[in-house]
Amino acid sequence: MNAERCYNTIRPATPPHPRTRKYSSNMKVVILCGGLGTRLKEETEYRPKPMVPVGNRPILWHIMKHYATHGHKDFILCLGYKGEVIKDYFLNYHWNTSDVTMKLGAQPEITYHSRHDEEDWTVTLLDTGDKTMTGGRLKRALKYVDDDEFLLTYGDGVSDVNINDLIAFHRAKGAEGTLTAVRPVGRFGELDLDNGKVANFAEKPKDGHASINGGFFVLNKSIEQHLDGDSCVLELGPLKRLSQAGKLAAYSHDGFWQCMDNIREMEMLNELWATGKAPWKTW
């Protein structure tokens, strides 16, 4: 995750009339999966960062399981660097997660003996280009979003944030966009929060208690008007403009959140999973 995930002042937004929005209980979940992951090069030389494993599953799977637990099972994956690895994973998902019996010969037969909880997921795999920036990837994905609201996150961070509480907060604020503000050990830019608003930004946090953008967004599809091509960086342009217009809210989450930017963080997440202490395991 990048330092750019931090924004300027937010002023209260006027809530739209509730009838003007098209709601869905199973909201589309857009996940940005296309970055190079250069700070995790030991792992990402051969696969995209969302496919780096935590336990025996990619971190992407953990993120998707968390959304699915809250009833959101319709995913749009914005692929880029080594996106074919992610495509192959889902194409062969049943094969790789089941006990199977194969009958060989000219007309082979395969019997799957296992079922899995992911059989009601819908996964759209969208090639958004190796060099496309975050806003450009989102712009390409929006043609698959039908409702007026959707969910968005990065493919490299896990949390125990309550997704449905986040959605309710977004609607109560009448915002066009809501980010999840979290408090990790400081090494990103800082968010100064004031009653659900982003009040100030500092380049370097003064201590380990600063709030930063942890992803896990709720966005209105109207953000499309701020996305102007593959070079568009979501965090540096569109979200800043929403902030300056008083239309970007911050949902404070004091629970667990952790991105996976380097080997140390990968090892920490794997240790939590191996010891049965993974706070993001909400299923």
Image (cartoon, rainbow, N blue to C red):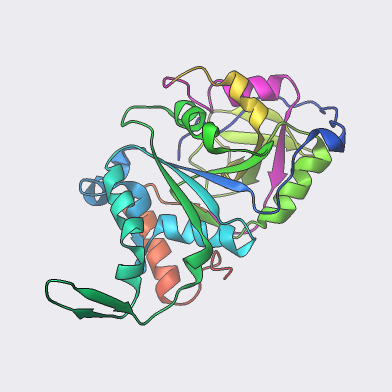
**What range of the chain is rendered magenta?**
230-257
Left or right of 256 in this view: 259: left
Residue at 38% over, 32% down: 128
Residue sitting farthest toward the front: 107
In the image, 92: left or right of 60?
Answer: left
Q: Please tell me which residue is depicted at 69% across the width and 36% down the height of the picture.
A: 148
Image point 81% across, 35% down: which residue?
Answer: 174
> Which one is in front, 258 or 206?
258
Percent from the top left, x then y, of residue 158? Answer: 51, 55
Corner quadrant of residue 176 = top right
Residue 89 located within the stretch drawn in magenta: no
Q: Is residue 65 visible?
A: yes
Count all numbered tags in the image, as a single digit.
Answer: 0
Q: Position of residue 59 (x, y in %)?
A: 41, 57
Depth check: give the residue in front, 111 or 244. Answer: 111
Picture coordinates of residue 29 (x, y %)?
56, 47
Identify the residue shown where x is 64% and y is 48%. 27
Residue 245 lies in magenta, yes or no?
yes
